[in-house]
Structures are given as C-alpha cells and as structure tokens.
Amino acid sequence: MATPTLDAFQVIADPSRRQILYLLTKDSYNISNLAENFEMSRPAVSKHIGILETAGFITIKSIGRERFCTLNQDGFTELRNWIDHFDEFWNIKLKNLDTILKGKKNSN
Amino acid sequence: MKTEIKHQWIYEQSPYEVWKYLTQSELIALWLMPNNFEAVVGHEFEFRTNPIPSLELSGIFYCKVLEIVPFKKLTYSWKGGPVYGITTLDTIVEWTLEEQGNGTILNLKHSGFKGENYDILMGMTDGWLKNIQKMLDHIN
C-alpha cells in the first residue's frame, strides 16, 4: 500500500494519528498493542503509522519479530542543537565577564 | 524536553557595576559581542558575530529591548536566521541581578527555543487535552 506524503499539519489533522502520537508520548508500543487502542483494523492502523513515519514523527524498530514504534527524535534535533549551542555560548561569555570584572578590579 | 537555558553566576562586584556591563554598548562588547545596544525600552539593536553554519545562523542577532528595571532586570528579544528577513530563531534573553553581600547573583534565562515538530506536537497535545475537557464538560 503506497503511503501518501502529507505535510506535518495534514499528518496531525487526523484524530487517529494524533492519538497514536499521544500514546507514544507515554510509552513505546508495538503495532499490535497500538492497534488494540483503536476500533479500526490493524492494516488501517499500520497505514497511519506509515504516514507518521514518512513525516518523521515516529521511528519503527524491529526487535525480533516485533515492530516497535517510538517518537522520532530527529524532528527535535534542531531544537536540541540550538539549545546546546547557546548553553555553551553563554557559559563562555559569562566566564569572560568574570575575567573582565576581575581584571578591572585588579588594575584599580 | 528542555526548551530554555538557565545560568547563574556570582560576581564579586556590586549589581551597580555588573549592570554597566549589561547595558553599556562598549562594555557589553568586551565580554559578549559587538553591538549597538542602548538602554531604552523599544530600542532595536544587533549583536554581530561570525556565521554559525551548523545552525544555519548568519551570526547577526536582531534584538529589541523589552524591559528595564535598573540594576535589577533587563530583557530583550533575540532573533536570528540564515539571512536577513528570515527568522528561524525567535527567543528571549532575560537578565536578573540580586545583591549578595558586596557581590551580585546574575541569572540568565534564554527561552523560547522551538523545533518544528516539537511545536506541532505540543500544540497538538494542548488541543487534544482541551478537546477531552470539552467532551467531559459536555457529558457532565
């Protein structure tokens, strides 16, 4: 079954897909466990999972015969890179300030 | 997920002294970056550094003074992007100063970091919870 490519907003416009993401914020699930939370057929749940995976919201890992879904961290990588960068940036700058204030005091 | 940065430093100098290094352009440049800051609410200014290719940032940060409480608090917006006119980083920098003995506790909060999917997901969760609430209200 071909997985349609949707933009992020179309992806989460669907209530079932929102519920899948919501469940995955609490825990990781295999596809059967996820499907148990819905009244639709397992293939229908699989299709939604395919759409979420294509859009980068979730990743699917095969462990033995089970396929586990987790929230995909890639979508959050940019955020983490920025935070890491500026965290270190401020650390260096505040140290600079300390050095400068101390230097000033010593020269007085 | 962490969406803000907090730092706390203690300096031996008084809040009056530290404040000067937060609010006088040439003193800020000594430890932070070249800038055209003025301690006036609403003043728009820029910090300039080298481009940061890994974050797709041009190295120019566009800022606006939002709040000034002399010797106690200073807040400005902190925006950046790959080129002029495109904002991918839209954040707030907040400084607070507390007197401690002869010195100063300086707190920095850099907040408002957002990732595309993170935003959507959080917006979604909020919306979802509101819908549940609406449903419960309706049932009751």
Image (tube, helix red, strand yellow):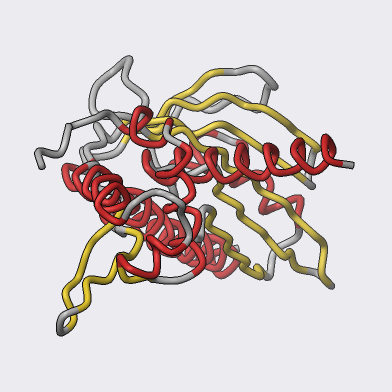
- Please tell me which residue is depicted at 60% across the width and 18% down the height of the picture: B43
Q: Residue at x 9, y 38 (%)?
A: A2
Foreground of the two, B25 or B41: B41
Taking the view exactly as shown, the residue that stands out farthest to the bottom is A64
**Is B127 on the left or on the right of B103, as rendered?**
left
Locate residue B31 relative to residue B97 in the image: left or right: left
Residue reaching furthest to the left: A2
Residue B42 is left or right of residue A90, and the answer is right
In screen coordinates, is B136 left or right of B118? right
Occupied quadrant, residue B139: top right
Task: Give the quadrant of the C terminus of chain A.
Answer: bottom right
The image shows residue B124, relative to residue A29, as above or below, that is above
Say which of B101 and A35 sits in front.
Answer: A35
Between B92 and A41, the one nearer to me in the picture: A41
Q: Quadrant of the N terminus of chain A?
A: top left
In the rendered image, residue B113, in percent from the top left (x then y), is placed at: 47, 44
Vertical comparison of B127 with A46: above or below: above
Viewer-closest of B20 and B67: B67
Could you tell me residue B61's position as x and y percent? 39, 31
Q: Is B11 rendered above or below residue B48?
A: below
Q: Quadrant of residue A33?
A: bottom left
Q: Looking at the image, is A53 positioned above or below residue B47?
A: below
Residue A26 point in image, percent of width and height: 51, 67
Q: Position of residue A102 (x, y in %)?
A: 55, 68
The mark total stands at 0
The residue located at (53%, 28%) in the rendering is B37
Residue pictured at 48% horizontal, 60% vertical: A37
